[in-house]
Image: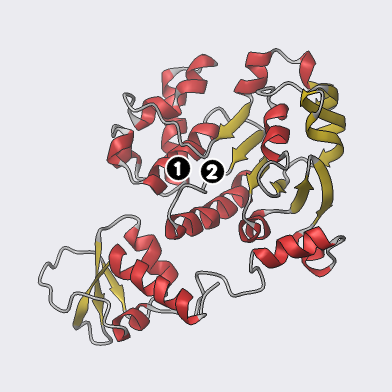
Amino acid sequence: MIRFENVTKKYTSDTVAVDHINLNIKDGEFFVFIGPSGCGKTTTLKMINRLIPLTTGTIYINEKRISDYDIHELRYDIGYVLQQIALFPHMTISENIAIVPELKKWDKKKIYDRITELLEMVGLDPELYRNRKPEELSGGEQQRVGVVRALAADPSIILMDEPFSALDPISRQKLQQDISELQKKIKKTIVFVTHDMKEALALGDRICLMQDGKIVQCDTPDNILKNPETDFVRNFIESGNVAHKPLLTETLTVQDMLDKKLFVPHHSDKTMAVLSATDSIETLITALSNHSSILVLGENDEELGVVNSEHLLVFLSDQLKEGALA
C-alpha cells in the first residue's frame, strides 16, 4: 500500500530528520510511528502526502511514486487529522465535513447523506450537530468531527498526527476506543503518530519506534513488549508504564465514586440522564460526553445522587494516586 524505499529527509547538510528508512505499510493496517520528540516520526508522516518533500529515496502508494500523482488529487485521496483540530470556526459542522467532497464535485444529496452517515458513525446525532458551529462543541466532539472530515471523501489512507494529545485524559481514552472500533468497520490504512506508548500499544497493528531519524524496531505490539531489540526500546516501553492496568478498568463502577462521597446527594430533575450504580466507569465516561450530569439510581430505582465530570476527574485522580490505575 505505502512503501518507503531508502527515504531520507535533510533540512541542512548536517541536519538529518529521516535517515535512509525502508518500510512497507500494508493495506488496511493501523500503523503507528512513535518515538521521542525530534525522532522524525511527524516528518515521515508528512512526506506521505507531500506536505514535506523528501530529499532522497522514493515513497510509493499502490506501487506508484507519490511524485507521479497530481498533488491536489493525492491530498484529496488522503485524509489528514491534526493535533490542532483546525475546524473552520465560521463554518457549520456540515460545511466543515463537506469541504473535500465539494472540491471533488459530489452532488448535494450524496454529500448530505455522507455527512449523516459519518456523524452517526462517531455517535453524534446528525440533526443536533449538523448546523452547529465548532465553538458549540466540546474538544472531544470537535476532534470526532475532525476524524470524520478526514473520512468524508472515502479516502483509502488516513494520516493522523498526534490527534488526541491536546485532549484531557478522559476524552483521549474515549477517542482511542472510538477510533479502534471505527477502524474495525471502515478498514482504512491508518498511519498514526504519537509519543505515547500506551496509545501505540492500544491502537497499532504494528508499531514503528524511531530514534534520531532511524527505525529502531518495527513489529507488533506483542512482540515489541516481549522482545525489545535494544535498550532504547526497552527504556522507552518502561518510561510509558505500559505494564500497569489500563485507565478504564472494568472493575470500577459508579458505586465506587459514591463510596468516595463524589456526588451531589439530592436531586429532583426527573428529565436527567440516568445510570445505575452498578454501571462501569467507562459507561459513565460515555454518558458524560453527552450530558453535563448523570442521576445515579440504586437497586430499587431510588435516587442515590448526581455525578458530573468534575466528580469523575477527582475520582480518577485519586485512583492514580492510589496506584489502582495506570
Residue linked to disc 1: 143
Which residue appears at 28% of the width and 87% of the height? 299
Q: Is residue 51 visible?
A: yes
Is mark 2 in CB contact (under 8 Å) with mark 1? yes
Compared to 35, does 252 lie above or below?
below
Where residue 275 sits, quadrant-wise, is bottom left
Which residue appears at 86% of the width and 37% of the height? 21
Position of residue 150 measured from the top left corner of the image (x, y, whole percent): 54, 33
- For the C terminus, give its image quadrant: bottom right
Position of residue 48 measured from the top left corner of the image (x, y, whole percent): 72, 29
Q: Earlier in the sequence, mark 2 or mark 1?
A: 1
Where residue 282 sits, quadrant-wise, is bottom left
Closer to the camera: disc 2 or disc 1? Answer: 2
Q: Is residue 318 left or right of residue 68?
A: left
Q: Is residue 199 left or right of residue 211?
A: left
Which residue appears at 84% of the width and 50% of the height? 216
Position of residue 92 measured from the top left corner of the image (x, y, whole percent): 33, 28
Residue linked to disc 2: 163
Q: Amino acid at mark 1?
A: Gln
- For the N terminus, give its image quadrant: top right
| 54 vs 104, nearest the viewer | 54
Compared to 76, does 189 lie above or below?
below
- Give the SS element for disc 1: helix
Q: Residues within 10 Å of mark 1 (few under 14, many from 20)?
A: many
Q: Amino acid at mark 2?
A: Pro
| 308 vs 37, nearest the viewer | 37
